[in-house]
Amino acid sequence: MIMKKELRKKILNQRSQPFLERETQTQKIEQKRFNLPELVKAKTVFCYAAYRGEVETRPLIVALLKAGKTVCVPYLTSKKPPMAAKQLLNVRELTPGVFGIDTSPDSAPFISMEQIDAAVIPGAAFDKKGNRLGYGGGFYDEFLARTRPDCVKIAPAFPFQIVPDLKPDEWDIPVDFIVTPDEVVRC
């Protein structure tokens, strides 16, 4: 079995390479995400701002804001957890923060963990049981551990990010849905 560190490096390298279908696959993922009933009924949605080859989320953020939802994005103050959620009122407000990851302005209000109904989160790889291989920093697992138990966790992924089996560690938080261009996997 391939080790997590090696798998992470392999997938992230593949994700960072340009590929012809990226835009088409991203659009298909967007269409499937927009139609998830759990996302439609959510009032407050936490959503990452795409970074380094992640599935693009800005169109989703725009659609969520137009639908009148409260949208929040990751906010870091250091290169170690914890991560917080800050409200985003307009996608044009995104500015580079820690690690160069786009976030809300410092003046934006924090959103409490109890308010978050759905979380759209990135990852390096996923299996169809909902196990997620993150980036190795523990930010999202620590963050998701503080959300409500009924917070729906949604992971967009390119097909090559789906692997047969990930062995989760005790602190790993699984996702509820994986959205690829071809399917929505209910985990």
Image: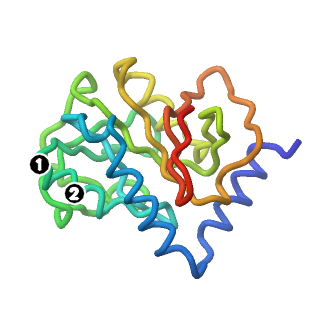
For mark 1, what is the residue?
A: 107
Does residue 178 appear to the left or right of 5 in the view shown?
left
Is 25 located above or below residue 45 in the figure? below
Task: Choose between 9 and 70: the one closer to the eye.
Answer: 70
Which residue lies under the disc numbered 2?
A: 63
Quarter of image, res 62: bottom left
Q: Residue at x 33, y 35 (%)?
A: 38
The chosen color scheme is rainbow
Picture residue at 56% right of the left edge, 76% below the top: 21
Looking at the rendered structure, the secondary structure element under dot 1 is loop
Residue at image position (21%, 36%) is 44
Q: Earlier in the sequence, mark 2 or mark 1?
A: 2
Mark-to-mark CA distance, 2 and 1: 23 Å
Q: Position of residue 108 (x, y in %)?
A: 13, 47
Q: Amino acid at mark 2?
A: Ala
Q: Could you say where residue 81 lies in the image, as x and y percent from the top left?
A: 44, 35
Please state if 33 lies on the left or on the right of 44 as rendered: right
Q: In this rendering, which labeled residue sits more in front, label 2 or label 1?
A: 2
Looking at the image, residue 132 lies above or below residue 182: above
